[in-house]
Amino acid sequence: MAPVAPRSGDAIFANIERVNAELFTLTYGAIVRQLLTDLEEVEEVNKQLEQMGYNIGIRLIDEFLAKSNVSRCVDFRETADVIAKVGFKMFLGVTASVSNWDAEGTCCSIILEDNPLVDFVELPDTCQGLYYCNILSGVIRGALEMVSMKTEVTWIRDVLRGDDVFELQVKLLKQVPEEYPYKDDE
Amino acid sequence: MPSSLSSILLHSFILPSSTSFPSSPVATATAALLSSSPSFAAVVEIELVLPDLAFLLHVVDSCSSPPPSLTGLVVLVLANLLHHSCNRIRLLAIQGFGSTSLLIKNAIFRGNGVCLLYREWNRPLRTLNAQQDHKLMFGLLFSLKSLTAKMDPTSAEKGNLGVPQLPGQGCSFHSFRTNTYKLSFMESPSGIKIILVTHPRTGDLRDSLKYIYNLYVEYVVKNPLYTPGAPIRCQLFNTTLDQYMRGIA
């Protein structure tokens, strides 16, 4: 039996169950607001959002792999392409693009032109250091960690801070293959 | 089944017939399997089906007289709880077989070779203790994967045997069949391994394995009360899995 070909982001997005976009945006906004009230420090909120994203990412990867049938990516370039074209499309309904590859191919930027998380959002002056979409960086970090890649994900450009697009920098730190867990003499 | 079959018969080992592999994981798995079985069959023929090629490994053992035709033989699905800092190996094993129909035993393993879930639907023979079982099965699969990737004639670059590989990289076997059971295997890039041990005349089970992976995603991964890596205690998952298995049996 021939292996099933991976499905495109559009096809999966069309078949998957969807939720109202406004509900999603407003819920996320409520979470961030509550975190700001509880933690008060903007840095703490950033960290907490990233941690929440990480917890989501470690579960999301299985759903992504099950629904999209992608096989193991050969190199990091393919990984970044899959995240931008299939992953973002499947879960957020937006297509991202990849650019700014460095010489070794371990660092790239994912550019998002529109982002459903930030509809209706404006950052007040008291929260200028806040990375509102930091949950996304946690999601990517968590998901890649479950496929044996340790990465570091940071925001380069953020529309809420005055730039024109969202730009996420994804840097591959190292690949961690699985090891035989039992000692030979056990 | 004759009562003389109360001893454990293990058929799930491979030995390279002509070449010898220096790798210790293969040796360990083989040695563990051999030492745990008090007596084993005369001839075992295992057919490994790889995506592009199939080859046969014959193992002849000069032990006691050939066993009668066995219908309810057990493959030990093992995983042991072992905390190993760099491991992210998760196994989902579903196993079981019976005389004329598909009998299923389900075991789910998780990171570090930890068994996440182990279910059986019809397993006539009890063998060893569960933890030993799990370890053996895990070692077997790990070694088989490593071996199949190393022996791939179409791949340009081959790592050394025993060198850990990223899950999903290289070619991986998807089933092997002996004269008494068939073991089907699927591994996701995130490390989840699904194993199904069934009657040898079962067809290709890759679709079933994919479906079970989908079930895992729906009922286990999306369950907020479930910690990734912990043994699975989701009743809904067990029920749905049961229904599916009885449906395809």
Image (tube, coloured by chain):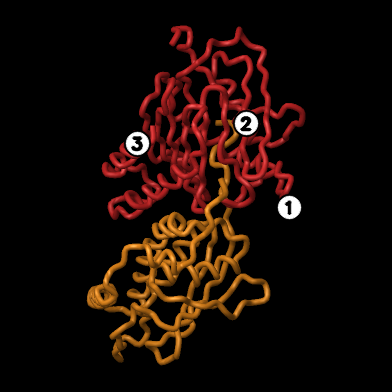
Chain colours: A orange, B red
Q: Where does label 3 land, which residue?
A: B247
Q: Are marks 2 and 1 on the same chain?
A: yes
Local crowd at mark 1 within 10 Å, few (<14), some, or many (≥20)?
Answer: few
Quadrant of the drawing holding the C terminus of chain A: top right
Report the side of A120 relative to B229 (left or right): left
Regarding mark 3 in the picture, which secondary structure is present there? helix
Closer mark to the observer between disc 3 and disc 2: 3
Question: Residues under labels 3 and 2: Cα distance?
Answer: 27 Å
Q: Where does label 2 land, which residue?
A: B47
Residue B157, labelled with which disc?
A: 1
Q: Position of residue B104 (x, y in %)?
A: 40, 31
Q: Position of residue B160 (x, y in %)?
A: 71, 45
Q: What residue sits 57% from the left and 51% below the top?
A: B168
**Mark 1: amino acid:** Glu
**Mark 3: amino acid:** Gly
Question: Residues under labels 2 and 1: Cα distance?
Answer: 25 Å
Regarding mark 1 in the picture, which secondary structure is present there? loop
Q: Are marks 3 and 2 on the same chain?
A: yes
Of pointers 2 and 1, the one earlier in the residue sequence: 2
Q: What residue sits 46% from the left and 61% below the top?
A: A143
Q: Is residue A92 above or below residue B175?
A: below
**Mark 2: amino acid:** Glu
- Which chain does the residue under circle 2 lie in? B
Q: Mark 3 near mark 1, Cβ–Cβ under 8 Å?
A: no
